[in-house]
Structure formats: structure tokens, C-alpha cells
Image (cartoon, grey):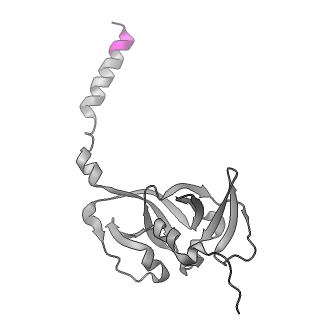
């Protein structure tokens, strides 16, 4: 056996001896995972899979006659993606400049749309026992919140993007003229 091979074998044995054990499959399965975001300074988490990707701020083209919360459409890899200002749609303050925001790409059935959020916090993991009910009134966004997780001294509200996509006001983004 060559000296290099013996050295690699010894290194492998040492790595196995000092390695941390893998988490148990059932413990990992019990953990709820979601994508952490901020809207109006409030932390939310959406179920993994509800948003397919997170984009940096895209170039937008305004849509004449659209609701004021519809920021415009972005060309994402040759497809037009309507982008909604979630802050304005939910009636929340906008604490950061838009150029720093992120856009969640959401695909529901055959429709895709973008939701502009002030920040993406990446994937968050929560123990099932940390699930609770929201303790604050979130105004217009309340009806889209399906609970909360308390973790590390922070409250993460569970936001259902599927419910947002089914909302009649969200679907009808055409600006209504006053009659």
C-alpha cells in the first residue's frame, strides 16, 4: 500500500472518530422548515415550496390602469412576472428603500407572480413545540397568517402565499375608477 493511500485511510478513520453524529431521521422529519422574510419590519415565514426562488430587485415596467400596489412587470428569463408591493397591498410601512428589497417568485397553478418583500432571511427551521398563535394584530395581513413560531426570542408569523394568490382583491389588480 502506498504512503499516500495509507495517509488518506488514516485521515478518513480520524474524521469518522471525531465527526458529529447525523440527526435522526424522525427528528429531522418533525422539524418544520420555511423561507424567512420581512414585510413592514415584521418577520414572516412561508412554507418551503410556496416560493420557487428569490430574486434581487428587477427592472420593472409599469402597467397602466393597475392597482397602486402592482409595481409593474419584470422580464424573468423571457417570461413576464407581475410584481406586487406587499407592503402597500397589506397596508404596512416600507422601512427600507426598494432597491434593497427581494422578490419572491410564486407559482400557483399555471400563474406566476412576484411578491416584493423588504428582506429574505433564508431557510428557517422550527421545532413543532414552538408553534403558537400570533399574539399581535397584523391588520390586513392577519387573514393570511396561519399561526406563528417562537424561536430564539423572535416570533415568526406563518404567511400562506397560496391564500394570498386566492384573494379576490389580489387577483383583480385592475384599478377601479371612481364612478
Q: Choose top left, top right, bottom left or bottom right for residue 113.
A: bottom right
**Looking at the image, which is closer to me, 132 or 13?**
132
**Looking at the image, which is closer to me, 85 or 3?**
85
Q: Give the side of residue 120 with respect to residue 3, left or right.
A: right
Residue 39 in percent (x, y) is at 52, 71
Quarter the N terminus occupies: top left
**Looking at the image, which is closer to me, 178 or 56?**
178
Kindly give the residue lying farthest to the bottom in the view shown. 179
Residue at 35%, 76% in the rendered image: 134
Residue at 43%, 56% in the rendered image: 48
**Looking at the image, which is closer to me, 40 or 112?**
112
Q: Is residue 25 visible?
A: yes
Q: Which residues are magenta?
A: 1-6
Q: Is residue 153 visible?
A: no
Majority secondary structure in the magenta region? helix
Residue 87 in percent (x, y) is at 57, 75
Amino acid at each position: 500500500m502506498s504512503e499516500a493511500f495509507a495517509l488518506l485511510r488514516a485521515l478518513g478513520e480520524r474524521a469518522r472518530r471525531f465527526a458529529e453524529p447525523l440527526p435522526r431521521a424522525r427528528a429531522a422529519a418533525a422539524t418544520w422548515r420555511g423561507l424567512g422574510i420581512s414585510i413592514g419590519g415584521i418577520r414572516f415565514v412561508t412554507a418551503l415550496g410556496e416560493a420557487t426562488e428569490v430574486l434581487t430587485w428587477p427592472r420593472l415596467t409599469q402597467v397602466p390602469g393597475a392597482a397602486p400596489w402592482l409595481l409593474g412587470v419584470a422580464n424573468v428569463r423571457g417570461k413576464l412576472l407581475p410584481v406586487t408591493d406587499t407592503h402597500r397591498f397589506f397596508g404596512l410601512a416600507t422601512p427600507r428603500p426598494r432597491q434593497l428589497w427581494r422578490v419572491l417568485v410564486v407559482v400557483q397553478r399555471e400563474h406566476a407572480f412576484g411578491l416584493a418583500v423588504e428582506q429574505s432571511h433564508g431557510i428557517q427551521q422550527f421545532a413543532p413545540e414552538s408553534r403558537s398563535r400570533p399574539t399581535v394584530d397584523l391588520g390586513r395581513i392577519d387573514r393570511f397568517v396561519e399561526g406563528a413560531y417562537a424561536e430564539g426570542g423572535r416570533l415568526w408569523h406563518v404567511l400562506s402565499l397560496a391564500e394570498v394568490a386566492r384573494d379576490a382583491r389580489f387577483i383583480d389588480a385592475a384599478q377601479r375608477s371612481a364612478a
